Amino acid sequence: MRLIERQPEINLETLLAQFVPPPRFKGAAFDSFHPDPHFPSQNQAKEHLQHWVRDKPQGIFKKKLPEPGAIYLDGGFGVGKTHLLVAAFWEAPAPKAYLSFEELTYTVGLMGMTQAVECFAKLAYLFIDEFELDDPGNTQMVTNLLKQAMDKGLRVAATSNTQPEALGQGRFSAEQFRIQIQSLAERFLALTLEGPDYRHRDFVQMPEPLNAEELEALYHEETHPASLDSFAELFYLLRGLHPIRYRYLFDGLEVIYLKGLASLSDQNDALRLVHFVDKLYD
């Protein structure tokens, strides 16, 4: 069986039912988040987010949740942003949704703006992982969606690796997009998590890869449902699929074999591979 022979399809009903954290984060909680004592900002972000998600409506005549209406977790890779985002999701009252930025843009495109605003405005909380505004069309679409839904009471928490006011800097030539980004950033309280990537490993010696003959021999001996593809062919497939469809490539499979692994010089391909591996973890 080969992944490149698959063309997974997706429908809106299936998509909406999956707006929850990935399975690998089912144990993520505030109590299981262990801040690095060398970087106090990690614990400060945790405590602030805990209070925010546990806020109760205030006011006598017109009850309203206190500001800020949105929290933005900023920081480098591997400092715990997604862990905290998932922990907040588990504690937040329903109705709520958790999805990646790519999933959000895909869903809005599938629904259309009017239906998307109606859908997301019904939520109490929306959690967005890896908020990104590289594409001008996505910039305008998500800005419009969040503005309308937040005006109706939606509270938002998001992660990214870029400060909100810096999103899009150096990437767009049109002034209108910078204005839109800045107006959206004003709705967020930014909390920075400092520290190194906890997943960093210093290998004394990198593990030796299997050669092509060894890999194919293992594949032919495999007793579980499996696929075998070349690394180059895999990218031919991934470049033609929206990342939201990657997860459906693995339906019915338990093992993925890839031969010809090579270095990547294109950042977009590197991001595709990261997303592909993330979906394998799930």
Image (cartoon, rainbow, N blue to C red):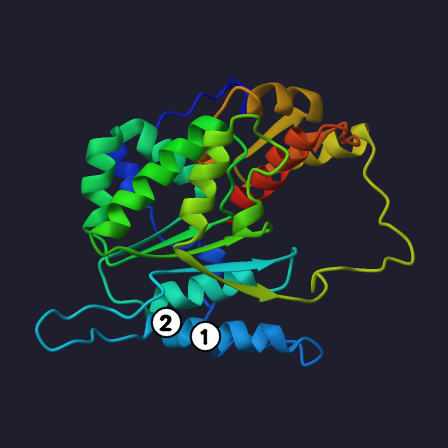
Write down the residue under mark 1.
48
Question: In the picture provided, is 251 more to the left or to the right than 173?
Answer: left
x, y percent for residue 170: 64, 34
Q: Amino acid at mark 2?
A: Trp
Residue positioned 70% across, 61% down in the render = 197
Mark 2: which secondary structure? helix
Question: In the picture provided, is 124 more to the left or to the right than 199?
Answer: left
Quadrant where the N terminus sits is: top right
165 in relation to 237, above or below: below
| Residue 52, numbered label | 2
Q: How far apart are the two marked residues, 2 and 1, measured between alpha carbons?
A: 6 Å
x, y percent for residue 69: 33, 61
Residue 26 in view: no
Which of the two residues, 246 or 33, is positioned nearer the viewer here? Answer: 33
Residue 108 in view: yes
| Residue 141, numbered label | none
